[in-house]
Image (cartoon, rainbow, N blue to C red):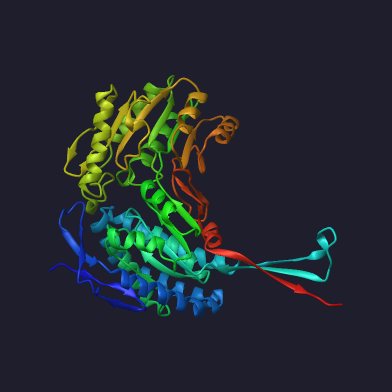
Amino acid sequence: MTNIYQFYINGEWRDSSSNETVSITSPYLRKEIGKVQAISRDEVNEAIQAAKVSQKSWERLTVRERGEYLYKWTDELLAMKEEIAQIIMEEVGKGYNDAVKEVVRTVDLIRYTIEDAVHTHGESMTGENFVGGSKSKIAIVNRVPLGVVLAISPFNYPVNLAAAKIAPALITGNAVIFKPATQGAISGVKMIEALHKAGLPKGVLHLVTGRGSVIGDYLVQHSGIDMISFTGGTGTGMHIAEISNLIPLVMELGGKDPALVREDADLVFTAEQIVAGAYSYSAQRCTAIKRVLVNEKVADQLVSLLKTGVESLSVGSPEDNNTIVPLIDDRSADYVQELIDDALEKGATLVVGNKRESNLIYPTLLDHVTPDMRIAWEEPFGPVLPIIRVTSDEEAVTLSNESEFGLQASIFTKDIDKAFALTAQIEAGSVQINSRTERGPDHFPFIGIKHSGMGAQGIRKSLESMTREKVTVLNINN
């Protein structure tokens, strides 16, 4: 019998008054594994109104008092670690071991968030520092919550990237409306079950699930929402930016992260890093390496090393902890196949791969990719890596910067001075020197520019983005 999961509102688990549900199909089992509630707009209104009321009392607690609830949350997450990992694996097709690591990493993130918030202090200043000022004025500057935060998470890290929004919002005194990705919603339910067990006060967090056509835009445009933190596709992110009501937005969107390989790079090490960065979890990561810009003098050697690495990747079910697993759905696999076919039709060389079984795309490596091919610019979100040969560092930087995306980049070289010089020229939120592109550690700033996002994430940056400064001026009458 299929499990039907409830939504969470005002401290209670409920079925929707719509009497409608959304089916969740496993990408590798290819069968329904559960249903989530398709809630109504009236229920959205109820959740936001309750959040606004509860936020006031939640804000009045000290940061340590709020932190105690979140510490209990981490204990419950660890107690449910295997159960949640099993759901992550079945729902989004991530290898079981990696799913367990995601839960553990999430616990570390929440605990670090609490401690960082505890050690965040305000400041004071006196008027005498400014021309014509006076010691009689003292400004006390504190950070205060924004109100109700709408947290929208993606499918690929359904627990970690949800907690990266929820934890900083809660610890800083905000209430939260949590909207998980539809594919990932059951994982979201499970992590909120753990928060409910921790005894979070009624109404501080609400979990809403449903059809985007019914509640998607309605949530984003709702006058009761004070801030939106979104991780997902660039198209959806741009839509949110267009229709939201002039409220703070932090968005982590798509990427086309390049690896720039200079002729002096350690090619064995570089190939290992590229394969790991380009293919893990079938490249369903915004920070996956998605193109290699390699100097033509070492391209043949690098491609040979990459071919060996790609051929050694394990392919199959996430239950066996394979690196290459079925993509999230057939439509995603169709899109990846379109990009491969386009490149081959336009003259790219197939090094390895281009094999498909339903939504399982075998790891594919394409050489001699040119700028007229879609794969040179579009984000596949699947296990295909294009090799673009360049004649100089300048050409590599130009091709890197011509992309509409600007999330991360990698530079592989033995010349650290040249690495820093190139870093200054590359248009990206982060540049990795002699390492693959990756999100963590979670306390580092995580920044996307251009069509890769706006604002900054990372624990401290998220604490700042979900609060605002408030100035109280004390006037001393002598």
Residue 158 image offset from top left, x and y in percent: 34, 58
Residue 352 image offset from top left, x and y in percent: 26, 30
Question: Would residue 414 be found to the left or right of residue 340 on screen?
Answer: right
Residue projecting furthest to the left:
1
Residue 166 image offset from top left, x and y in percent: 43, 65
The quarter of the rendered structure image containing the C terminus is bottom right
Residue 176 higher or lower than 164, as above or below? below
Residue appearing at x 36%, y 28% in the figure: 387
Q: In terms of depth relative to the viewer, which is nearer, 288 or 101?
A: 288
Q: In terms of depth relative to the viewer, which is nearer, 441 or 228?
A: 228
Residue 248 image offset from top left, x and y in percent: 51, 58
Residue projecting furthest to the right:
478
Residue appearing at x 53%, y 67% in the figure: 146
Q: In which quarter of the view is residue 425 placed?
A: top right
The quarter of the rendered structure image containing the N terminus is bottom left
Question: Would residue 102 be found to the left or right of residue 136 on screen?
Answer: left
Q: In terms of depth relative to the viewer, which is nearer, 323 or 343?
A: 343
Residue 98 higher or lower than 137, as above or below? above
* Viewer can see residue 79: no
Count of number-bearing discs: 0
* Viewer can see residue 402: yes
Q: In terms of depth relative to the viewer, which is nearer, 104 or 287?
A: 287
Q: In which quarter of the view is residue 304 placed?
A: top left
